[in-house]
Amino acid sequence: MAKQIFGQIGRLKKEKIQEYVELHQAVWPDVLKTIKECNLEHYSIFLKGDLVFAYFEYTGIDYEADMEKMAADETTQKWWTFTRPCFEKYDADSEEAFYVDMKSIFYLD
């Protein structure tokens, strides 16, 4: 399967912006290891005010299975107990307050 490109957007609680930034200045090594084992590459997070944008490339063959693997990882689950509470609901249609996938409309390789 060819690589898949993902963009995600979310909104941070204003009082949690600095905490979220600090968490990402010292990401736990085991979280980074799991991200790589789940075939995510070129993972970047950008911040503008309270908006966060994430970009990554998926190079595996089964995205859903790799995301289930990530969600099952105990260290990642613990990491999420710190990062997810930093978010407020961005999209009324989303079931949770976290990143929402964006539709890709242009890519130049």
Image (cartoon, grey):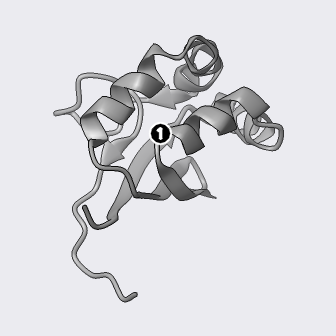
Q: Where residue 97 sits in the image (x, y, percent)?
A: 38, 27
At x 77% / y 33%, what residue is drawn? 29
Frontmost residue, 57 versus 19: 57
Quarter of the image holding residue 46?
bottom right
Horizontally, residue 91 falls left or right of residue 22, namely left
Frontmost residue, 43 versus 20: 43
Q: Where residue 8 sits in the image (x, y, percent)?
A: 38, 51
At x 59% / y 13%, what residue is drawn? 81
> How many discs appear?
1
Q: Where residue 103 sits in the image (x, y, percent)?
A: 22, 61
The residue carrying mark 1 is: 38
At x 36% / y 50%, what residue is drawn? 60
Q: Where residue 95 sits in the image (x, y, percent)?
A: 23, 23
Image quarter hosting the C terminus: bottom left
- Amino acid type at circle 1 is Cys
Q: Secondary structure at mark 1?
A: loop
- Does 105 sit above or below residue 48? below
- Does 64 sit above or below residue 36? above
